[in-house]
């Protein structure tokens, strides 16, 4: 194999692949990237649950394949000062050359490297704007459970119906939903992406230049395809909760306030809430009071009021601070609306000007 490429293009491909490599000591080849020079040059990695192949433009002088540990290869590229990199296979090992620098990396037999080819190869996917899908995933991913004990809760739900893209995630304590109308082709698809793979898709979308990408999904896998890149991951074979039924349609109390004021109030409450991370919200519309309290025996206590437009009944209710604040950076408008459905019942947070995002959080019972 002989391949010449700019360092930046090669390094960008390796950065994407490095996050996908496996860590199984029983199969050392999974800790490698597979470098393949044929009609073009590609960098490939897999952990058996997900895989990525990135095509890198450059000059192929001689065809060949080699597998090298990604950590060694990545650190070698970072240390190179030259703009051009030459890759050669010598005595079945990889020689990396660049402007007076030579590094020989011991290769691992690549015969056991898993094939990334999917059953969807060549099949046309649903076209989606890259930035739209990225925003849709980022708007809800934090609400998924980090555990896969219940796979449907440890995943991000993606639905495309009549051209509308809907993403949702829940850990049973809170729920986030984001909707984009007329975001994709008129093709119906539903898929549950494990959280770690959804985060990986977001990472990829942040780093590719394509404006349009395609998604292909079936009951076993998801394929994300962009020019020069293909990412394949398994999906969850489960049913996402019918969350529409638990979102309140009416509210007993409503408050509209500046998002910045709420963020600052919750930041202070976090300091005084101790390990419990509990904040009490006290909303008295007739007295025009929106108040938050937090206390800890070891630290002290706080009580802050902020200006808000209020309506409905008085309510005193407790929440986990993180669950209240996690959604706020994702809301673009300056004002948010909090809809309370009564004591012990869920709170719904929305943008005051954008109804495409819904966030529901359950109160603390104590």
Image: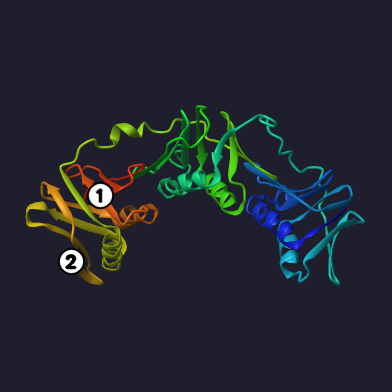
Q: Residue at x 70, y 45 (%)?
A: 228
Among the two numbered marks 1 and 2 on one chain, the one whose residue lies closer to the N terminus: 2
Question: Dot 2, how many residues are within 10 Å of its Cα: few (below 14), some (14-19), or many (20+)?
Answer: some
- Asked if residue 203 lies left or right of residue 3, the reply is left
User: In the depicted view, which residue is nearer to us: 260 or 359?
Assistant: 260
Please give the label number shown on residue 303.
2
The answer to whether any part of residue 151 appears in the image is no
Q: Give how far across and how far down residue 240 sits, in percent.
A: 42, 33
Q: Marks 1/2: CA distance?
A: 21 Å
For the residue labelled by badge 2, is the local secondary structure a helix, a strand or a loop?
Answer: strand
- Asked if residue 169 lies left or right of residue 210, the reply is left
Number of the front mark, 1 or 2: 1
Q: Write down the residue under mark 1.
A: 337
- Asked if residue 347 lies left or right of residue 47, the reply is left
Task: Point out the residue furthest to the right here.
Answer: 91
Q: Residue at x 55, y 45 (%)?
A: 130
């Amino acid at each position: 194999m002989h391949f010449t490429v700019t360092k930046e293009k090669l390094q960008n491909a390796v950065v994407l692949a490095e996050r996908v490599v496996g860590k199984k000591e029983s199969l050392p080849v999974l800790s490698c990237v597979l470098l393949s020079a044929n009609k073009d040059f590609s960098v490939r990695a897999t952990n058996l649950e997900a895989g990525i192949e990135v095509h890198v433009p450059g000059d192929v002088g001689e065809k060949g394949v080699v597998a090298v540990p990604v950590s060694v290869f990545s650190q070698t590229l970072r240390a190179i000062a030259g703009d051009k990199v030459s890759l050669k296979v010598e005595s079945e090992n990889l020689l990396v050359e660049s402007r007076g620098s030579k590094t020989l990396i011991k290769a691992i037999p690549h015969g056991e490297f898993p094939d990334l080819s999917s059953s969807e190869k060549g099949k046309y996917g649903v076209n989606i704007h890259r930035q739209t899908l990225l925003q849709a995933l980022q708007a809800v991913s934090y609400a998924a459970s980090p555990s896969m004990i219940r796979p449907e809760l440890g995943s991000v739900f993606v639905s495309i119906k009549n051209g509308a893209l809907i993403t949702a995630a829940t850990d049973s304590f809170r729920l986030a939903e984001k909707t984009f109308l007329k975001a994709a082709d008129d093709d119906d698809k539903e898929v549950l992406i494990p959280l770690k793979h959804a985060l990986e898709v977001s990472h990829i979308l942040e780093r590719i230049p394509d404006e349009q990408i395609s998604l292909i999904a079936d009951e076993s896998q998801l394929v994300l395809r962009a020019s020069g890149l293909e990412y394949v991951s398994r999906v969850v074979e489960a049913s996402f909760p019918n969350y529409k039924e638990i979102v309140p349609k009416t509210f007993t109390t409503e408050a509209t306030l500046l998002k910045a004021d709420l963020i600052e109030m919750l930041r202070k409450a976090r300091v005084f809430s101790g390990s419990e991370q509990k904040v009490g919200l006290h909303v008295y519309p007739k007295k025009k009071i929106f108040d938050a309290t937090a206390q800890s025996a070891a630290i002290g206590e706080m009580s802050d009021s902020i200006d808000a437009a209020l309506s409905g009944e008085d309510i005193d209710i407790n929440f986990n601070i993180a669950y209240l604040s996690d959604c706020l950076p994702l809301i673009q408008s300056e004002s948010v609306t909090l809809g309370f459905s009564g004591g012990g019942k869920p709170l719904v947070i929305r943008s005051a000007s954008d109804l495409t995002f819904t966030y529901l959080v359950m109160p603390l019972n104590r």
